[in-house]
Amino acid sequence: MPATEPVRLGRKRALPSCPNPLFLKWLTELRDEAKEKGLKIQYTYQKAINSLNKYPLPLKNAKEAKILQNFGDGICKILDEKLQRYYRENGADASIHALPKGAPPPGRSDNNIILAPSKKKNAAGDQGKDGGGDGGRKKKREYVPQKRSGGYAVLLTLYKETQVPGSKGYMFKMELQAEAQHLCDKSFTAPDLGSKYTAWSSVSTLIQKNLVIKTHNPARYSLTEGGLTLAERLASAEQTNTDGDREAVRSELEATEEDDPVVDITGSDEDEEEKEENRIHPAERQPTVTEVSCDVDDVRSSGKPQDSQTTMTTSRKPNAECLLPGTYEIMLCVDFIETTGGSHHRKQELVKELQRNGVNFDIRKLNVGDFLWVTREKVAPVAGQLRAPVGRELVLDYIVERKRMDDLCGSIIDGRFREQKFRLKRCGLHKPIYLVEECGSAASHLSLPETTLQQAIVNTQVVDGFFVKRVQDVRESAAYLTIMTRFLTKLYQNRTLICRSRELEGDGGSDEEERGLPSCSLMSFAEFNHGAVKNKCQTVREVFARQLMQISGLSGDKAAAILEHYSTPHSLLTAYEQCASEAEKEKLLSSIRYGKLKRNLGPALSRTVYQLYCTQGALT
């Protein structure tokens, strides 16, 4: 065997010391501080430490460190500030290349222990592969939402819904948020200060974990088998904690009453104020809005009030919420498109006119229409909280679509005119208004004849049933909106407004108003605006209706009449197959009645629809 070089035994050669120990110390402190707070910037600091350890030359200031990898403007600025403070404390001639006392030695293991998450996973994976049997893949940890979190509240609420006899087995978004809110510490609708996430954001995690399933449009939420099992465990744990803590809480409250009260400015004081008011004036306490609405519904349905437990259960349902006279204000909502873009001067003139007239209005995004009115609940600010609670908003039955003559001409040409009227009819508000501006000489300079535009306006009023208001300019439009706002304020000032759900109760809700009753049911603004989204996922029925309306002469009323008999293309094609002859197929839809006058569709339109869906090859 040939002679080989002797094997070198002993410890490894020590790494050369870092020539910038002061910068290394500060970066290490920044990294450790970020690690304690759980910030991901700790990995950035660690990368900067690795780059600094590899750099063999001394640095005079932090700006020179910009040539190193992972040193950005932020890190260099922090190091410069620390360097200036160091000079002020130790003098301008103090050396920055000597190792300060207590600084971690360069190359020490604790300067290289923090790895990025991806590296950790790879290291763990490699270790698992080499480890064999017992050191193999770890068991996946089960997802359990934190108590009083959004996912926790949603799971418990859906579980309680399944335990109600005769329940439908699912919940809509609006009622799920209302029912789950008292089980969660965060709001399901309003994000925290400085954040864009709400408690509702956790629902996507539940769907991803296959605990909750989302179906239909509007969305229906229900529990999967795994979600039901987890919800049962959470409910049993909640019940156990409630029973065990009840005596402890009662004794703690008794002991607290004897001591001086302690004010917690981070929480809500509503419960404490209510307890104090009940203790001092038990007979003078007025019922809350939710309690009154619940009592009204209970008396109306059964003729006598129910017990307190049933009352509390009913009060949490969205349909039982109401606004009493004097607890709300009428406010005009203006679509932000009406104030931005296009002729900016003209659109700002509308805002200035509304302000000059003293109209209470708010600019927001409206998914349908240009103006509408909402009733906003008057909510007093809560002591110890930065923002006042968000009041509930219900939408009145009036909605305005504003059209200048040039815009009307363009919408007729590109097809928006029919689509907008169709969406206004289906938005759930029963008193649509068409506000037409510049009905005079402006029409003579447009690409369509004035007679065509006037006929379209008349059809909107006579055929579609819209109320058409003609004005000359922006100032008259603002005057009309001002008068309508004051009229609606007077009309609703003595009415009790009941919040209804569009999915659960349908679109009917203005019968009480027509009969002059002191109460009426209205949709919430959030539900209305969500249901009016233009590009939302559409059902087969809605797409079928859009297809039919592309046929010349087939209006929205005629399409709706066809959908009452044949809701999908499949059902229509099945009906065609059951016909005995071609003549019978062509006349299949001719006897369907539509509109208020109940006229027949006619054989010509019926033949056109048949040819569209049953002709093989291209249409001639």
Image (spheres, rainbow, N blue to C red):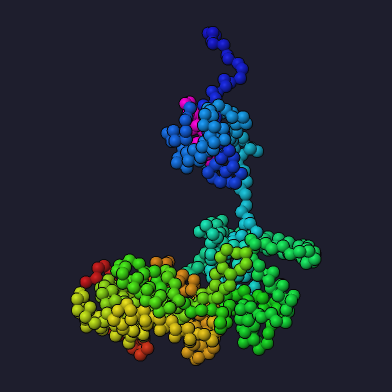
- Residue 86 spot, x, y in % from top left: 55, 35
Up-down relation of residue 184 to residue 487 (above or below): above
Q: Is residue 48 magenta?
A: yes
**On the picture, is 195 further left or further right than 148?**
left
Please give the name of the residue rendered at 62% of the width and 77% of the height, measured from the top-left corner.
290
Q: Nearer the viewer, residue 39 or 87?
A: 87
Q: Position of residue 276 (x, y in %)?
A: 72, 72
Q: Is residue 294 above or below residue 236?
A: below
Task: Tell me which residue sits at (66%, 67%) in the image.
Answer: 269
**Quadrant of the rendered structure where residue 287 is?**
bottom right
Q: Position of residue 386 (x, y in %)?
A: 57, 63
Magenta stretch: helix, strand or loop mostly: helix
Q: Farthest bottom residue?
A: 515
Judging depth in this view, the residue of 20 and 172 nearest the camera is 20
Left/right of residue 114 with respect to residue 241 in the rendered view = left
Find out whether residue 557 is within the magenta segment.
no
Q: Is residue 543 above or below residue 497?
A: above
Instruction: Report whether residue 356 is seen.
Output: yes
**Viewport quadrant of the N terminus:** top right
Residue at point 21% right, 71% down? 620
Q: Quadrant of residue 389?
A: bottom right
Number of numbered tags placed on the structure image: 0
Q: Nearer the viewer, residue 596 or 454?
A: 454
Q: Which residues are magenta?
A: 43-57
Tell me the residue at 52%/36% (across/down): 83
Q: Is residue 570 visible?
A: no
Instruction: Give percent across and percent down for residue 166.
Output: 62, 75
- Relative to the observer, which residue lies in front, 142 or 395? 395
